Image: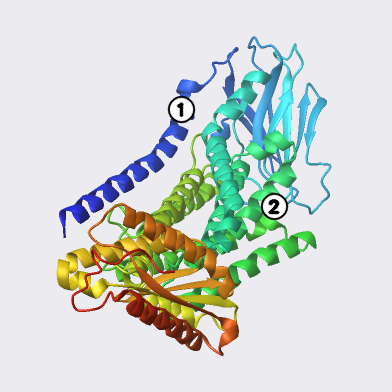
């Protein structure tokens, strides 16, 4: 490896590492923004009412009970859990009770008067989503008796009760938003990133890259962004529509595996396992469509597919990890990206973290739902971390693929230049001319065959280095004079060829005059040699095929060359065109 190549490789690796560090700054920025350092302090104290409750469940009365220790496992549709207690004396402006329920209808009473209801406007058998409840109390609430009735709208709706908090309404809403700030930032970032990719994707699809994977990566980013916003109840808070928000949450969750598989198929990471991936795609789409149809027909609510989805997705994830690991091993001896790591491995790491996060979140979901009595957990969740990891991995993977594509394109251009460019003049060589003429077909064109007079004598008298200078300079004159033509090439030695499409013989005269003037200008500068040339023209209307047209132009060029010989005698034994020929014949 040469010193230049080593330096280029080192610079590429440095750029790759900088890009990787830049990608790592995104989650660091999001987590810093989500830390308590940027939280607004509360105006009033708030109190967790986790103990001192009287609980009525299945006809039994439990006095002075902690909410987190009560077990209501095995609840069925229609069963009711009642929580009662006296409210403590805490100085508050705009007092409020807040708590969470899952798949349940709620009534709240203050001193026997109903002050809040939720879910009773939803028909029996329909989907009742999880919700955070903000129950305003009277200003003289202290010492009042509060009663919360939670009725299961579905089997397994709850296995206990979430904690109840007493505080100022504004403070409690601020706490709700601040505790979900990371989820909000991540969700908005992923949706914005996906939207930007979606806008750019048509240009990349219809362009030279023909890259469909960018479209599916945009869909994954937007779907996961929406899912994170819904999962963290941010969408529900801002839309004030719990049902719509949680339906969107389930739909984005159910369709995400299908889009991930489409991304793998179009990103080139499938490595020959296309049939299996198409089978998994069909299965995932079938499950998602079945969930929608059964929900719309009210035969089975969409949330009942969650367990089926968890089992299917986790089983499928094991295969996807195996596929990407095997793909990475097979590409071990192939090209690496800027930091010496295959693009498939970047994607593998992101998907692995995403799947691991999903697995941990599934475990957490069932533990909190059925083991820890449905208590809420605040802070960053595994879903948010996993979603961010897969989006960042796709962003890096696409970046590395784009760089590889540009590198390959530059290499192809360089190789094409080596194969089809004349090294001495920089114009097209014989192979390029032959290829161009073969592609002309039945189109209309004009051909100019040009011969540089006196090259042999310059080589013999002054050396081939001066002859090379003469050829190189004449190539520059041709490029300038025939700049509007489609092909300017060197057929070999002192023979040159010019082709112009949609033109006839007469259309080439202006360019030939331009070449004559350029040669005369160079001759006036007093170089060690003088430019003289002969030419012949022909067009497609004079012969049946391009070779015949070229031969006709070549014959006319030789006739002009013979006339030059007779008139000037520039090829006599004692004549030296390097100094004795005068002017240019055109």
Q: Read off the residue under disc 2.
A: 76
Q: Read off the residue under disc 1.
A: 35
**Mark 2 secondary-structure assignment:** loop
Question: Which label number is shown at residue 198?
Answer: none
Identify which residue is drawn at 33% across, 42% down.
18
Q: Is residue 11 above or below residue 484?
A: above
> How many C-alpha atoms fall within 10 Å of the one at disc 1: few (<14), some, or many (≥20)?
some
Q: Is residue 468 above or below residue 40?
A: below
**Which one is nearer the viewer's eye here, 190 or 159?**
190
Identify which residue is drawn at 43% across, 58% down.
517
**Which one is nearer the viewer's eye here, 249 or 25?**
25
The x and y percentages for residue 519 are 38, 60
The x and y percentages for residue 80 are 73, 42
The x and y percentages for residue 117 are 79, 34
Identify which residue is drawn at 70% across, 28% down.
134
The answer to whether one can see residue 104 in this image is no
Q: Is residue 213 left or right of residue 158?
A: left
For residue 460, what is the image quadrant?
A: bottom left
The answer to whether one can see residue 412 in this image is yes
Looking at the image, is mark 2 or mark 1 earlier in the sequence? 1
> How many C-alpha atoms fall within 10 Å of the one at disc 2: few (<14), some, or many (≥20)?
some
Quadrant containing the C terminus in the rendered view: bottom left
Q: Is residue 363 left or right of residue 579?
A: right
For residue 251, what is the image quadrant?
A: bottom right
**Which one is nearer the viewer's eye here, 176 or 59?**
176
């Amino acid at each position: 490896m040469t010193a230049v190549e080593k330096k280029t490789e080192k610079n590429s690796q440095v750029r790759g590492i900088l890009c990787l560090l830049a990608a790592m700054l995104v989650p660091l920025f999001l987590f810093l923004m989500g830390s308590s350092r940027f939280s607004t302090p509360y105006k009033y104290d708030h109190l967790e009412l986790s103990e001192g409750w009287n609980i009525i469940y299945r006809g039994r009365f439990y006095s002075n009970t902690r909410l987190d220790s009560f077990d209501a496992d095995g609840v069925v549709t229609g069963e009711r859990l009642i929580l009662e207690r006296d409210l403590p004396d805490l100085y508050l402006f705009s007092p409020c009770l807040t708590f969470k329920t899952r798949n349940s209808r709620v009534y709240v009473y203050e001193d026997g008067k109903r002050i809040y209801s939720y879910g009773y406007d939803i028909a029996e058998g329909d989907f009742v989503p999880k919700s955070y409840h903000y129950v305003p109390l009277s200003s003289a609430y202290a010492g009042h008796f509060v009663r919360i009735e939670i009725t299961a709208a579905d089997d397994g709706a709850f296995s206990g009760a979430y904690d109840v908090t007493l505080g100022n309404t504004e403070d409690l809403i601020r706490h709700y938003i601040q505790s979900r700030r990371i989820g909000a930032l991540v969700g908005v970032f992923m949706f914005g990133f996906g939207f930007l990719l979606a806008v750019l994707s048509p240009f990349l699809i219809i362009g030279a890259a023909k890259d469909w994977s960018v479209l599916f990566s945009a869909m994954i980013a937007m779907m996961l962004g929406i899912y994170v916003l819904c999962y963290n109840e941010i969408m529900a808070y801002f839309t004030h529509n719990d049902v719509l928000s949680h339906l969107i949450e389930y739909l984005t969750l159910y369709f995400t595996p299908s889009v991930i598989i489409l991304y793998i198929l179009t990103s080139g990471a499938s490595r020959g396992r296309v049939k299996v991936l198409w089978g998994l795609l069909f299965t995932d789409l079938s499950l998602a469509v079945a969930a929608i149809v059964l929900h719309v027909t009210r035969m089975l609510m969409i949330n009942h597919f969650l367990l089926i989805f968890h089992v299917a997705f986790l089983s499928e994830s094991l295969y996807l990890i195996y596929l990407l690991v095997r793909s990475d091993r097979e590409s071990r001896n192939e090209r690496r990206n800027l930091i010496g790591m295959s693009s498939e491995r970047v994607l593998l790491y992101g998907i692995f973290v995403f799947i691991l996060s999903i697995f941990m979140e599934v475990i957490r979901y069932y533990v909190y739902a059925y083991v820890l009595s449905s208590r809420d957990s605040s802070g960053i969740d595994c879903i948010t971390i996993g979603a961010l990891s897969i989006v960042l991995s796709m962003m890096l993977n696409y970046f590395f693929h784009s760089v590889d594509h540009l590198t390959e394109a530059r290499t192809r251009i360089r190789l094409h230049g080596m194969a089809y460019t004349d090294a001495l003049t920089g114009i097209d060589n014989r192979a390029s001319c032959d290829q161009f003429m073969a592609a002309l077909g039945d189109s209309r064109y004009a051909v100019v065959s040009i011969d540089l007079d006196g090259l042999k004598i310059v080589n013999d008298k002054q050396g081939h280095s001066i002859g090379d200078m003469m050829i190189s300079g004449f190539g520059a004159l041709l490029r300038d004079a025939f700049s509007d033509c489609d092909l300017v090439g060197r057929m070999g030695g002192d023979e040159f060829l010019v082709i112009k499409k949609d033109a006839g013989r007469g259309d080439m005269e202006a360019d030939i005059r331009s070449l004559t003037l350029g040669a005369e200008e160079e001759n006036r500068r007093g170089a060690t040699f003088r430019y003289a040339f002969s030419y012949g023209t022909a067009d497609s209307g004079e012969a049946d095929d391009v070779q015949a047209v070229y031969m006709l132009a070549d014959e006319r060029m030789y006739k002009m060359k013979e006339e030059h010989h007779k008139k000037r005698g520039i090829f006599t034994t004692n004549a030296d065109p390097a100094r004795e020929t005068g002017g240019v014949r055109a």
